[in-house]
Amino acid sequence: MSTRRIRGAAITAALAAAVTACSAPSSGGSDDGTSAGSVVIGVASEPDTLSPLLGYGKDGNSKIFDGLLARDAGLKLKPALAAALPEVTDGGRTYTFTLREGVEFSDGEPLTAADVVYTYRTVLDAKTNNTFKSELDAVEEVRAKGDDQVVFTLKYPYAPFAARTVLPIVPEHLAGRQDPNTGSFNTKPVGTGPYVLSKWSKGEKLTFKANPRYWGGAPKVKSFTMAIVADDNVRATRLRSGDLDGAVLPPNLAATFKNEDGKRTYQARSYDFRAVTLPTAGEVTGDRAIRRALDAAVDREAMVDRILDGAGRPAYGPLPVDDPAFSKAVERAHDLGRAKKILDEAGWKPGDGGIRAKDGRRASFTLLYPSGDKVRQDHALAYASDAKKAGIDVRVESATWEVIEPRMKDTAVLAGFGSTGDPDFGLYTLLHSSLAGDGFNNMARYDNPAVDRALDEARRSQDPDKRRSAYATVQRALVQDPGYTFLTHIDHLYVLADRWDGLTTQLEPHEHGFASGPWWNIEDWQPKK
């Protein structure tokens, strides 16, 4: 979630789009780019903005923009707008980047160091309405050194800082003349990336065309369209009808294409997890015993098997089990007996219909999930079933994000999070109390001083062992004082027409569809011969 929320069109809009859909992708050139050199991909959501100043593409892989650095297929950092990896001096407090020569924005204006300085200063400006400023907390100053060098001075050595410089760079000569929060740049962006936005029909599709000025060479895929189809079933139907070349699909629907000629399924490992936020402001969810009981009652293995069809792993916390910083000490089995014991000892006694009560208050709360998301719906229903066995009544409701957002403060949500690159990238915004209620950051409004101290220590330390120990402290604290019920880490599944070579997957974050997926490197695809 956070800025990576799903804001897909309503199911009715998706159904309407299916009825009025364009012709088959390979049938000839139309405004949608439906020709042999184009791709039409169905995704579940569209961004609110295409401005990096407000968060678009901040983790890399934007097709409109580039960062100073980028990531390769194995997530190793490589130069992008920078000519080389940065020079790091002053004990890790100074990073100097030299810009690549000859780079132009898609409007023909040259990239300069001033554009980089403008981008970072605007992102960090308190007046800019983004929720990721804390990710660049280490930056004390950014300045230009001539036209081709940028120098970052940090407040403290921040081990993963270089990975933060995948942030896309915007042109000062355009964005600098506008209010970053409301200006037209948010929907009519100009960047240095391999593609330019040619059309955006809100709630329906975004069409991109190859940037003839791209410094990395002309892409073979001349255009691609991201069709916004919120409902999983409608997306699968449009893919099967030939209206889409590819789609993001949940496991049960991806499986239906297994033996279909001309289609190929891609499965990407991810840091993407599903969890239930348990707001401390909720009358029931704010009770620590309730939260601990739910953690013990949930059957994570069954969710992986039955909901994800094995395409995922149990989530014992925000880090997946194969992350180097994962603490194996927090792995725990489904234990309904322990859940009941926790509730008994806390004074939650069985009442009418087996639902527990304490001081006249029933152990009952609402759990919201976004409409049209079958995977979250199935997680929510399984969670409610497990909770009921412990005597907790969870009422599952679907809603749009417009309905969910105002209720997040005191209502549980079936949410999704997860960032790649470094534990700090995902854990700080998820858990630090300073970010409670800051948009989709710390949705549960979790407040644990020991966790805050450990997160701060890990962020400011250069010592790998100290950082690992701090993150182990965080993970142990989340077992004893959970602000979320972590359910599963999910693999991302994509089904595409088998017409191109060069498609690969990366280890992916929560956000996928626009930035991640087999199309993370669409500019490098080659038509099959």
Image (cartoon, rainbow, N blue to C red):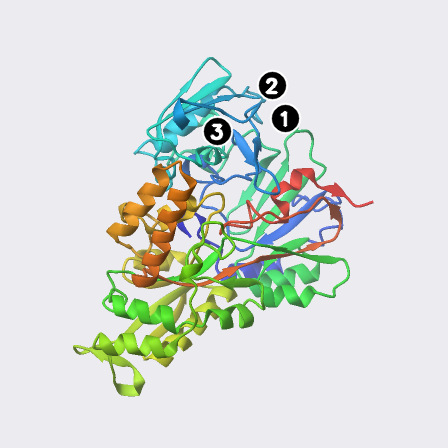
Q: In the structure shown, which secondary structural element does the residue marked by tag 2 occupy?
A: loop
Q: Residues within 10 Å of mark 3 (few under 14, many from 20)?
A: many
Residue 36 lies, with reference to residue 87, above or below; the image says below
Question: Residue 50: x and y, percent?
Answer: 48, 39
Labels 2 & 1 near each other (Cβ < 8 A): yes
Say which amino acid is labelled 3.
Answer: Val
Labels 2 & 3 near each other (Cβ < 8 A): no
Mark 2 vs 1, N-terminal side: 2
Question: Residue 510: x and y, percent?
Answer: 49, 52
Q: Residues within 10 Å of mark 1 (few under 14, many from 20)?
A: some
The residue that disc 2 covers is: 102
Say which amino acid is labelled 1.
Answer: Trp
Q: CA distance from mark 2 to mark 1?
A: 8 Å
Q: Nearer the viewer, mark 2 or mark 3?
A: 2
Labels 3 & 1 near each other (Cβ < 8 A): no
Residue 497 vs residue 155, the one in the foreground: 155
Q: Residue at x 44, y 52 (%)?
A: 5
Residue 404 vs residue 325, the one in the foreground: 325
Q: In the structure shown, which secondary structural element does the residue marked by tag 1 occupy?
A: loop
Residue 433 lies, with reference to residue 409, above or below; the image says above
Say which amino acid is labelled 2.
Answer: Gly
Residue 67, numbered label: none
Question: Residue 65: x and y, percent?
Answer: 54, 33
Q: CA distance from mark 3 to mark 1?
A: 15 Å
Question: Residue 68: x and y, percent?
Answer: 52, 29
Q: Quadrant of residue 366?
A: bottom left
Mark 3 vs 1, N-terminal side: 3
The residue that disc 1 covers is: 215
Residue 157 lies, with reference to residue 421, above or below; the image says above
The residue that disc 3 covers is: 170
Q: CA distance from mark 2 to mark 3?
A: 16 Å
Q: Residue furthest top?
A: 146
